[in-house]
Structure formats: structure tokens, C-alpha cells
């Protein structure tokens, strides 16, 4: 996994201001900015298992496959992992997964509300985020995509639990509160395993749909229990 080295002490996090905020909400400027409530689709993933796949172990696993925006911040796809089911799923082919990060949690609320994501990214990715956020960014526009898979123990089957329909990238804006971007990266790494000196960095962000655009997002709570949600409005 290129770019993921042992722990060091990164520079202090700085407050990020926008030149012109493009989206606003009542969310506070720290992640996870909005606490889940009843009715939300909330996915809590076993991120350490995603890094250390073990035969016989099953849990929700999430992958941030790409992330770019804020006027030139293009996070490297420098994490390569084994797929827990070899050949993979429809939304997440195997046998290997190359991604920007591994998802810890994702919360979807409604068609017009923010989506909150917490993921772990490499040292290089975290450094890129810090460098970009050290100065005002010219835009809040981003593109990203993710896939979360889960296992149905009764049917003994893996299934795609959350992803953008047809492999589309999600077009969005980073949420903004009082002129501050709702995005952050931790200063200290988390070890992917007690026995491995490899650290990854928690990366949190909250996105809102851009005006006049919609994205079809698919969710599932089982192999045959699927939901399609339009995120954003055409108005």
C-alpha cells in the first residue's frame, strides 16, 4: 500500500476559509458535523477488517474509490487491498480493490440533505488535504464515488449496500458553515493493525448536492432489499 508509512507528527491543522461559499447548511464545521437521527441510512464499516481481510470474518466494508475537487485536490488511489470475496460484486469487482481510502462510516439523510463520510486515507493523501486546506480554496465543487458491501448471514451472501448507480461519480459541493469548509483530516495516524507499523489518517467530509443536479444512489439492506434515492433536485 504505497504512501502508508509509520506514525509521525504532522503540522497543526489550520482553519480553512472560502473566497465565496457555494453551499450552506446549519451543520457545525467539524466532522461528523451532523449526528444521525431516526430514518437516516447509516453505514458503520469495519475499516480494519477491510485492510486486513481474514477468511471467515464478515462485516460491512466500505471503499472510497475516488475523490477530487476544491480546485485541484486530487487524492491518490494509492491503497490496494484484497477483495473479501475474490471475484467481487457487481458494483465492486475483484480480486483486488484500488482506492483512495477505506470508509469508516457514511450517513445519507434525504434528497436535499448533506451526506457525511468518514474514511481512512494514506499519509500522502492526508498531506495533500492539509496542503490544500492551508489556504483558501477557489471552489467547493468535488467529485467522488464509493462502494459499501455487506454480508447477509442467513443467505450466506455478500451484496452491494451503497453506491452510485451505473458507476457514476457523485458531483457535489463540500458543505460550508459560517464560511468554513466542513472537511478535516486528523493530525495523528491510526494503525491498521496492532502488529503492523502502518498508519492511516481519518478523513472526514460532508457534501451537499449542487443546485439543479441529481444523482441516483442505490442502497440495500439485504441481497433482495434495494432502495434507489435521488440526491439533489432539478430545480
Image: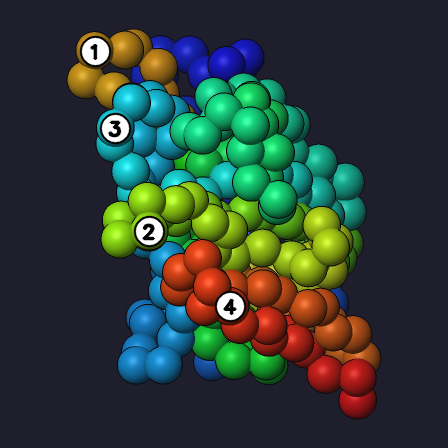
- Mark 1 or mark 2: name the one nearer the start of the chain: 2
Q: Which residue is mark 2?
A: 155
The residue at 55%/28% (across/down) is 87
| Secondary element at tag 3 | loop
Q: How is the image coloured?
A: rainbow
Between 36 and 148, the one nearer to me in the picture = 148
Between 28 and 87, the one nearer to me in the picture = 87
State how far apart marks 1 and 2 are (Cα): 33 Å
**With respect to residue 116, does 58 lie above or below?**
above
How many discs mark residues in the rendered view?
4
Do callouts 1 and 2 mark residues in contact (Cβ within 8 Å)?
no
- Mark 3 or mark 1: name the one nearer the start of the chain: 3
Q: Residues within 10 Å of mark 2 (few under 14, many from 20)?
A: few
Q: Which residue is mark 1?
A: 195
Q: Quadrant of residue 92?
A: top right
Q: Which residue is mark 3?
A: 56
- Mark 2 or mark 3: name the one nearer the start of the chain: 3
Q: Position of residue 88 (x, y in %)?
A: 54, 33
| Secondary element at tag 1 | loop
Do callouts 3 and 1 mark residues in contact (Cβ within 8 Å)?
no
The residue at 25%/20% (across/down) is 193
Q: Position of residue 197 (x, y in %)?
A: 29, 10
- Mark 4 or mark 3: name the one nearer the start of the chain: 3
The residue at 54%/47% (across/down) is 147
State how far apart marks 2 and 3 are (Cα): 15 Å
Can you tell which mark lies on residue 52? Answer: none
- Give the side of residue 235 with respect to residue 15, left or right: right
Q: Quadrant of residue 99?
A: top right
Q: Which residue is mark 4?
A: 226
Whether residue 23 is visible here, answered yes or no, is no
Between 44 and 180, the one nearer to me in the picture = 44
State how far apart marks 4 and 1 are (Cα): 38 Å
Amino acid at each position: 500500500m504505497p504512501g502508508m508509512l509509520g506514525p509521525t507528527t504532522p503540522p497543526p491543522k489550520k482553519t480553512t476559509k472560502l473566497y465565496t461559499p457555494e453551499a450552506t447548511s446549519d451543520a457545525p464545521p467539524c466532522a461528523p458535523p451532523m449526528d444521525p437521527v431516526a430514518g437516516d441510512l447509516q453505514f458503520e464499516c469495519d475499516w480494519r477488517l477491510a485492510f486486513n481481510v481474514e477468511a471467515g470474518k464478515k462485516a460491512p466494508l466500505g471503499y472510497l474509490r475516488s475523490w477530487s475537487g476544491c480546485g485541484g485536490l486530487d487524492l491518490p488511489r494509492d491503497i490496494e487491498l484484497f477483495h473479501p470475496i475474490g471475484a467481487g460484486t457487481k458494483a465492486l469487482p475483484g480480486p483486488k480493490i484500488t482506492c483512495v481510502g477505506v470508509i469508516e462510516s457514511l450517513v445519507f439523510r434525504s434528497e436535499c440533505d448533506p451526506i457525511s463520510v468518514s474514511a481512512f486515507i494514506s499519509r500522502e493523501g492526508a498531506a495533500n488535504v492539509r496542503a490544500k486546506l492551508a489556504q483558501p480554496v477557489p471552489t467547493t465543487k468535488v467529485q467522488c464515488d464509493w462502494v459499501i458491501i455487506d454480508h447477509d448471514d442467513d443467505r450466506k451472501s455478500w451484496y452491494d449496500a451503497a453506491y452510485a448507480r451505473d458507476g457514476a461519480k457523485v458531483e457535489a459541493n463540500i458543505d460550508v458553515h459560517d464560511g468554513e469548509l466542513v472537511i478535516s483530516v486528523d493530525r495523528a495516524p491510526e494503525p491498521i493493525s496492532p502488529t503492523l507499523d502502518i498508519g492511516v489518517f481519518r478523513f472526514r467530509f460532508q457534501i451537499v448536492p449542487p443546485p439543479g443536479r441529481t444523482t441516483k444512489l442505490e442502497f440495500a439492506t439485504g441481497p433482495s432489499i434495494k432502495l434507489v434515492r435521488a440526491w439533489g433536485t432539478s430545480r
